Image (cartoon, grey):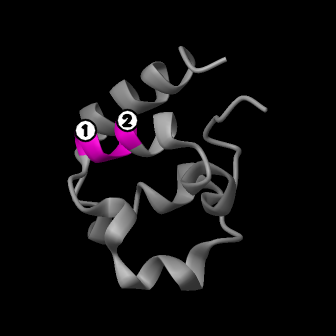
Amino acid sequence: MAISYDSTLKEVLESPEAVALIEKYSPGFSKNPQLKMALGMKLGMCVKFPQAKMTKEQVKALEEDLKTLA
């Protein structure tokens, strides 16, 4: 299954390639203890939270990089 902004956080965290991409833009994102509360949420929503510490440009770049995972 391809990972995208519409994937749940649980699905994303099950993909080592997707985790690596997220960590590239937001180091420590996948280790945040608050993630357990958001496993059912869409990735696109999670990366916009302040805890992700991602700029709009980084969010856009991540979205483009995720398209390379097929």
Tag 2: residue type? Answer: Leu
Question: Please, is residue 1 above or below residue 43 in the view?
Answer: above
Q: Residue at x 55, y 58 (%)?
A: 45
Mark 2 is surrounded, within 10 Å at the Cα level, by few (under 14), some (14 to 19) or many (20 or more) other residues, namely some
Mark 1, other Cα within 10 Å: few <14 / some 14–19 / many ≥20:
few
Q: Which residue is mark 1?
A: 24
Judge left or right: residue 22 versus residue 36: left
For disc 2, the marked residue is 21
Inter-mark Cα distance, 2 to 1: 5 Å
Extent of the magenta region: 20-25
Question: What amino acid is labelled 1 in the image?
Answer: Lys
Q: Is residue 31 magenta?
A: no
Whether pointer 2 and pointer 1 mark residues with C-beta atoms closer than 8 Å, the reply is yes
Look at 24% across and 62% down and name the residue there. 28
Q: How many marks are shown on the rendered structure? A: 2
Q: Position of residue 40 (x, y in %)?
A: 71, 70
Where residue 18 appears, as percent x and y from the top left, is 49, 38
Residue 67 is left or right of residue 20, and the answer is right
Residue 65, given in percent of the width and then of the height, sits at 44, 21
